[in-house]
Image: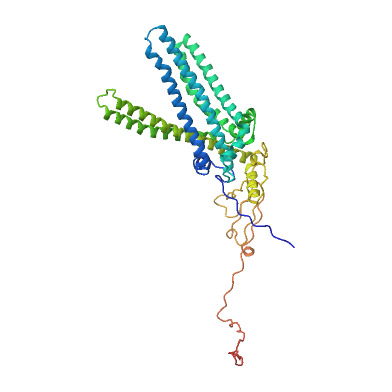
Amino acid sequence: MTSYPAWTPASRPGIIPLHPLTFGTILGRSFTALRHNPKVLLGFALGIQAVTYIVVIVAIGAIAIAAFSRLDTLRPGTEEFDTVLAGSIALVVVAGIVLGLLAGAVGVIVQGVVVTEVARGAVAEKPTLGAIWAQLKPVVWRLVGYAFLLAAAGVLAVTFVVLILIAIGFAVLPVAIVLSVLAVLGAIPLVLWLSTKLMLAPSAIILEHATIRGAIVRSWTLIRGRFWVGLGVLVLVSLTFSVLAQLVSVPFSLLTSGVTTIISPTGDPEPGAIVALIFGLILTQVVTLLIQAVAVVVQSTASALVYIDCRMRREGLDLDLQSYVEQRDAGRTDLPDPYRLHVGRAIAPRPVAPAYPAYPGPQGYGPPPGYPAPQGYGPPPGYAAPPSPAAPSPAAPSPAAAAPPAPVPPGPSSPPPPVPPTSWAAPGGAPERDAP
């Protein structure tokens, strides 16, 4: 006995359609993906990023106050004063570097959480923070190492260029000034180019468990053909949040200046004016840091979506994701991670829908050479199709053969057609026949 397969519901939609993405889809879903799993993206990623920024600023400020407060007991111009001043500056710089590295490590972990959540959200899953950490934990130090390696390379490159410019400045100062301006102008496209070429490396480390070198090679390879899309998303997201930060900070700055002027109209350093100024500056900085935290989350989301789109186009990742969703919704639970399947696979070019054939010149009414004429339609009477130089055109059917014969109306002298006799019977009566 044959039984039909059990009914399964349609696959639930994720944050993106499971096919190659357009530029508008990537840019739009980078912002709307925040609503998919707000406990992770807004609760953890945004919260921990903002708290880290605030803690770093407060810690550096406290260290600076404690370091420079020792100068109040010393007389300026003495050797002891200069020694304490140099030590205070060095202490603040070292503290800033250490705390900045710690904040960078936290930011890298936040980026890993966001990329993992976006990858699961593409297949309509909402993992908990514990499940995300379980997937991220094996590669978290590799991810942090890649971030520090990238930062160290940037610092070394900048230091090398600055030392060269300083050496040139001691010899020929005008040339050093011109070269400094050219170096700054040339660094902008170089940084954008390198940032775009390497923007997929964190996603490769997180989702494929690639090594640092392998992730750099993967990013360099996957972004080919989608470089301008990645650059456009990167630039637009950065510009959006930069403008937003300026729009938010300017009203707070104006409000702080207004309140300070009202409290102290003469400009004297009164305690109330100083408190208002400090409170306004802190509030402005906190709001700016919150916007920067959202920017980090959105940029990480955009990088993950560009990575998924590039793998869909080059390796057919959309087919693996669709198969995973279908089998998961059918009840299977032992499915492998679709992002680690067929890594580096090369697929044949996708078939493209054929375009409509071009019509011949204005003098032609028939089909292009090589296409049969549709039945019932032909060229006007007396028209001869021009010969084709490439291939002889098949002869068009004559109007008499192509068009169906038209019905001939009966003439006035032709007899009317005979009417067949009909019979009708009333209920319970005998049938009656019409007379011919």
**Vertical relation: 318 (above or below) 77:** below
Q: Position of residue 75 (x, y in %)?
A: 37, 9
Q: At 38% from the left edge and 12% from the top edge, which residue is drawn?
A: 73
Q: At 57% from the left edge and 30% from the top edge, which residue is drawn?
A: 197
Q: Where is residue 217 in the image (x, y as percent from the top left)?
A: 63, 30
In this view of the protein, which residue sits in the foreground, 320 or 175? 320
Task: Identify the image's colour scheme: rainbow, by chain, secondary structure or one colour.
Answer: rainbow
Q: Quadrant of residue 259?
A: top left
In this view of the protein, which residue sits in the foreground, 273 or 31? 273
**Vertical relation: 192 (above or below) 356:** above
In this view of the protein, which residue sits in the foreground, 37 or 274? 274
Q: Quadrant of residue 257?
A: top left
Specify the quadrant that holds the N terminus: bottom right
Seen in the image, is 12 located left or right of residue 250? Answer: right
Seen in the image, is 77 located left or right of residue 25? Answer: left
Q: Where is residue 229 in the image (x, y as percent from the top left)?
A: 54, 36
Q: At 49% from the left edge and 33% from the top edge, which residue is drawn?
A: 49
The furthest residue to the left: 266
| Residue 284 seen in the current view | yes
- Number of numbered discs: 0
Seen in the image, is 27 located left or right of residue 348? Answer: left
The furthest residue to the bottom: 430
The furthest residue to the front: 73
| Residue 24 seen in the current view | no
The furthest residue to the top: 79
Specify the quadrant that holds the C terminus: bottom right
Q: Position of residue 355 (x, y in %)?
A: 59, 48
**Vertical relation: 157 (above or below) 171:** below
